[in-house]
């Protein structure tokens, strides 16, 4: 089996995530789109770790590190969104461009 199907799937997932992050106005959808993009990167890392020119564990280790960073990003992002929703009553990203109340 070759690496091409994995890279194609990762490219499709990344493009879907990029479209969602750039075009949607709901902050929760933007966070989910960023997670989809990070999962596409993880798929690339694992595919290159298995089928790359020099197979090894480096891609898998980077993927685990990426998963932990993504989990921390979601926790902080959701906490910020909950606080902004309590203060402003909306999750629209166009309303969240200033730091003032």
Image (cartoon, rainbow, N blue to C red):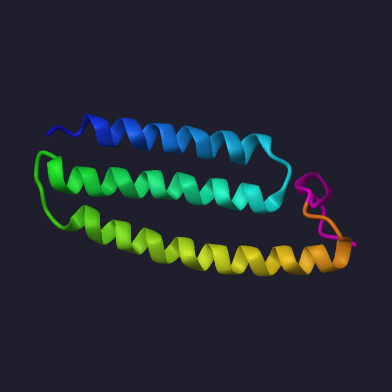
How many numbered marks have been drawn onto this rendered protein structure?
0
Residue 80, position in %: x, y? Answer: 70, 66
Q: Picture quarter containing residue 87?
A: bottom right
78 in magenta: no
Q: What x and y, as percent, mark residue 36? A: 48, 47
Left or right, 12 with respect to 61, comes to: right
Residue at 39% x, 43% y is 40
Q: Is residue 51 left or right of residue 71?
A: left
In the rendered image, the quadrant that contains the C terminus is bottom right
Q: Assign the magenta stretch its main secondary structure.
A: loop
Please tell me which residue is depicted at 14% across the width and 32% down the height of the picture. Answer: 2
In which image quadrant can residue 54 be found?
top left
In this rendering, position of residue 49 left or right of residue 90: left
In the rendered image of this protein, does residue 45 appear above or below residue 77? above
Q: Which residue lies furthest to the right in this view?
A: 101
**Percent position of residue 29, x then y:** 64, 48
Q: Quadrant of the N terminus?
A: top left
Instruction: State whether residue 23 is above or below residue 45.
Output: above
32 is higher (above) or lower (below) than 81: above
Name the residue at 36% across, 37% down.
Answer: 10
Q: Give the range drawn in magenta.
A: 92-101
- Residue 77 picture location, percent across and down: 62, 63
Which residue lies at the image location 52% right of the left edge and 40% below the top edge? 17
Residue 97 as seen in the image, left or right of residue 4: right
Instruction: Specify whether residue 95 is painted magenta.
Output: yes
């Amino acid at each position: 089996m070759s690496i091409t199907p994995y890279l194609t799937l990762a490219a499709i997932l990344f493009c879907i995530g990029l479209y969602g992050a750039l075009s949607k106005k709901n902050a929760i959808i933007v966070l989910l789109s960023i997670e989809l993009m990070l999962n596409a990167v993880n798929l690339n890392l694992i595919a290159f770790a298995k089928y790359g020119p020099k197979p090894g564990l480096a891609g898998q280790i980077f993927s685990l590190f990426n998963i932990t960073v993504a989990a921390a990003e979601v926790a902080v992002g959701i906490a910020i969104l909950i606080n902004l929703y309590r203060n402003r009553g909306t999750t629209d990203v166009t309303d969240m461009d200033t730091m003032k109340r």
